Image (cartoon, rainbow, N blue to C red):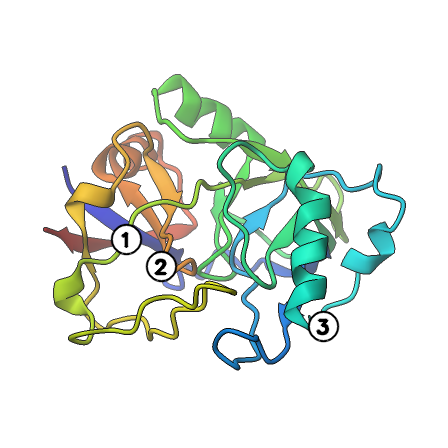
Amino acid sequence: MPYFRIKEDTSSPEYTGDIDAAHKWKLPGVFECLGCGATWGDNSIAYPSVDLTPIATKADFEEARAEPIEEYERLCGLVRPYLPPGAMLEPGTALGPLVGKAQGRFGPLVSPYPWWLLVERTALEKLQAEGVRGLNGCRTQLRFRQRSPPELLELELVVTGRAHPDCLPPNPKPPCPRCGRRGLRLPDNLLLDLGTLPKHLDVFRLEDFSTVIVCTGHFVEACRGLGLKGVSFHPLRAK
């Protein structure tokens, strides 16, 4: 089965849309991890379906910051009951809907950052009717300037699949056992590890490089057959 990386389509002058938004809540980054000494956080993993309003101390999740790892772990424990099954957490994980401003003209598919994938509601329904798997559209809280704005939903992507060792540096260090940091740079020629890729999803986010959104050939064929534009598809090798 062919695989592709999804990115914004910058070749279409008809799409002028711009989004200035962030997720409503987020986990803090880690400050000087006791396991590896690193201070870091990465907000590319997002669970927009999560609602933290029942948490009395939800204000602890509103400000982007770095905390000692003990505090990060305590906050992880508070949010875990509200996560989808099998959700992966790491420092900086984004939670809740996208909140902010949007303007301009958008295509049916929108990827303003490589790690975000939004879809117009009618386009989502068409893809689901084509049997595309792994599409969980979540409401956004985007404010538009124009009349009759599109209804953009954010896809909540399962975090799964890895890069093949052949495209990584030899003898890489294992992830930090305390905070999970890998410290790897995204390879210029990404090679997917076929044995780790899901068989039941047509779009997902890589576990070890979470800024990368991967889709199957079925997803690409469905988008092209339906005339859904706004993103570009870049072939990836798998081994």
Instruction: State the separation of the CA atoms marked 2 and 3.
Output: 22 Å
- The local secondary structure at tag 1 comes to loop
Tell me the number on the disc at residue 65.
3
Left of 80 or right of it: where is 54?
A: right
Q: Residue at x 57, y 31 (%)?
A: 121
Location of the N terminus (image quadrant)? top left
Mark 1 — residue?
162
Dot 1, crowdedness within 10 Å: few (<14), some or many (≥20)?
some
Q: Mark 2 and mark 1 in contact (Cβ < 8 Å)? A: yes
Dot 3, crowdedness within 10 Å: few (<14), some or many (≥20)?
some
Residue 160 at least partly seen = yes
- The local secondary structure at tag 2 comes to loop
Q: Pinpoint residue 106: horizontal percent, then vertical percent.
A: 55, 50
Instruction: State the separation of the CA atoms marked 1 and 3.
Output: 28 Å
Q: Pinpoint residue 203: horizontal percent, then vertical percent.
A: 36, 39
Q: Residue at x 15, y 75 (%)?
A: 170
Q: Amino acid at mark 2?
A: Asp
Tell me the number on the disc at residue 208.
2
Dot 2, crowdedness within 10 Å: few (<14), some or many (≥20)?
some
Choose between 16 and 93: the one closer to the eye. Answer: 93
Left of 46 or right of it: where is 181?
A: left
Q: Pinpoint residue 63: horizontal percent, then vertical percent.
A: 78, 66
Q: Amino acid at mark 1?
A: Arg
- Where, by quadrant of the figure, is residue 131 drawn? top left
Give the mark nearer the N terminus: 1 vs 3.
3
Indicate whether 51 appears above or below 185: above
Left of 129 or right of it: where is 20?
A: right
Q: Mark 3 and mark 2 in contact (Cβ < 8 Å)? A: no
Give the mark nearer the N terminus: 2 vs 3.
3
